Image (cartoon, grey):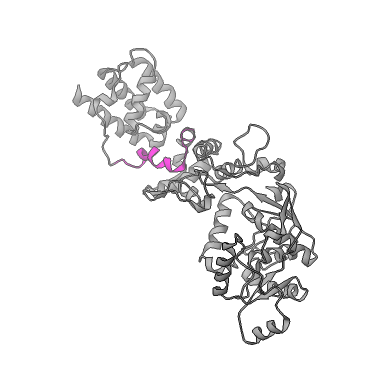
Amino acid sequence: MFARRFGGQFILRIEDTDQKREVVGAADNIMASMRWLGIDWDEGPDVGGPYGPYVQTERAELYQQWAHWLVDQGFAYKCFATPEELEEMRVTLQAKGDMSGYDRRYRDYPAEKVAELEAQGKPYVIRFKMPLDGVTVVEDMIRGAVTFDNSQLTDYVILKSSGLPTYHLAHVIDDHFMQISHITRGDEWLSTAPLHFQLWEAFGWERPYYAHMPVILNPSGKGKLSKRTQSFVDGQWQVLVRVEEFQEQGYLPQAVNNFIANVGWSSGDDQEIFTVADIVPRFDLQDVNPSPTSLPYAKLDWINGQHIQQMDPLDLAKAIKPFLEAAGYEVNVEALLAVVPAMGVRLKRLTEAADFLRFLFVDDEPLALTADDLVHKQLPPEAAQQGYAQVREFVQTTPLYDLETIQNRVTEIGEVVTTTGKAGAFLGKLRLAVTGQQVSPPVFESMVALGRERTTARLDEALQILKTAV
């Protein structure tokens, strides 16, 4: 939203230098999820651009070059500490209340000893020399100036022994060479932002603007959402996290965007339902609340329902088609158009469509109804029989079988056969007879969707049930 508002370029860069956490197919999943959400990028691994490659492991030589430049210029050094040494340091320092985990023993190691260790083929990492005193001030677009005491910071690893960089080095080098102007990232990176600011200073490069966004918490308020601990019940997570989980549960991409945008940001008015396009012209990072918060899951169904109601009927029919097919139904999108407008006001999730429209796909099942289900205190058995029979005759003989014609004639029949002269009770029972469901689209739309023959067959079945009971 920020990039689009100010006419900037939105860049997708795959940061995969932590190979221990590499998951096969993860990058493809990221791109598929973003595309489903409608988030597009101007440059990236799949579309190219003038500053590629856009996958960090393909840029390893660049990072190595500049890491060694920092060493040569005295801003960084080679550290030969073994895992055993590091563990010993950690324990010793912790006993003194120092949680840095590293005692800087190789920071001022004599050059001849460094050369000697290198000649022996000893593996090393490159660490950045953080200032030992003074402060580092991190300028943030959301939080303002955040001051860090340099004496409380450690010498961070910027290049691993594998030759791959850590995030700290890689993002600074990439943001410089890709001419990034603004960086938005989670506020868990704020604690290492002093290193990043010092790296920019050491390189002598113009620093981008940083905005540290609040993390989204678990519903309990403890721990960030990506570390969910909620239970897995009946094959589903009780709290959705991954984009495809929202998709599988029948949420619209525009609703998910709306849902997430409401967290930690406000347009300044009471508007809760909007599209990304609606809010791009007024989005400002300075309106983001810096405090972490939980996703308001209780509102998600309502937000999704509002977006469903705003959909064009054909688009909604296409959207529910995969969920109907997943239930084993053969779907004709055009046939759904009769019921979709009326159904849209009732759906909260697209997954509900399969149960809602089941009556359209189960002609071989008998009506699981009794005579009591088909009558009402305002619609006695004989009146019910008379009404259903008249509707059946109308269905069979009317030249026009469309929504308006059906609505007018069936309502007239209902007003005649009920004891109150009002059609409501009759229409409710007729809907049950036609669909066999307590929850379904309105009766007129259901009759159109079923068509003459199938509607007639349902009415014949209802009349038979009433006949045996009278």
Q: Residue at x 58, y 54 (%)?
A: 35
- Single out the residue that lies furthest toward the top: 420
Quick check: can you spot residue 399? no
Q: Is residue 10 above or below residue 447?
A: below
Spot occupied by residue 383 in the image (x, y as percentages of width and height): 28, 18
Q: Which residues are magenta?
A: 343-363
Task: Determine whether, in the image, residue 356 is placed left or right of residue 123.
Answer: left
Q: Residue at x 46, y 33 (%)?
A: 346
State yes or no: residue 175 in magenta.
no
Q: Is residue 229 above or below residue 95?
A: above
Spot occupied by residue 65 in the image (x, y as percentages of width and height): 72, 75
Question: Which quarter of the rendering shows the C terminus?
Answer: top left
Quadrant for residue 133, please give it: bottom right
Spot occupied by residue 71 in the image (x, y as percentages of width and height): 73, 74
Nearer-the-camera pick, 183 or 418:
183
Q: Residue at x 65, y 44 (%)?
A: 290
Task: Determine whether, in the image, residue 385 is placed left or right of residue 272.
Answer: left
State yes or no: residue 356 in magenta.
yes
Spot occupied by residue 312 in the image (x, y as percentages of width and height): 55, 39
Quick check: can you spot residue 460? yes
Q: Residue at x 48, y 42 (%)?
A: 317
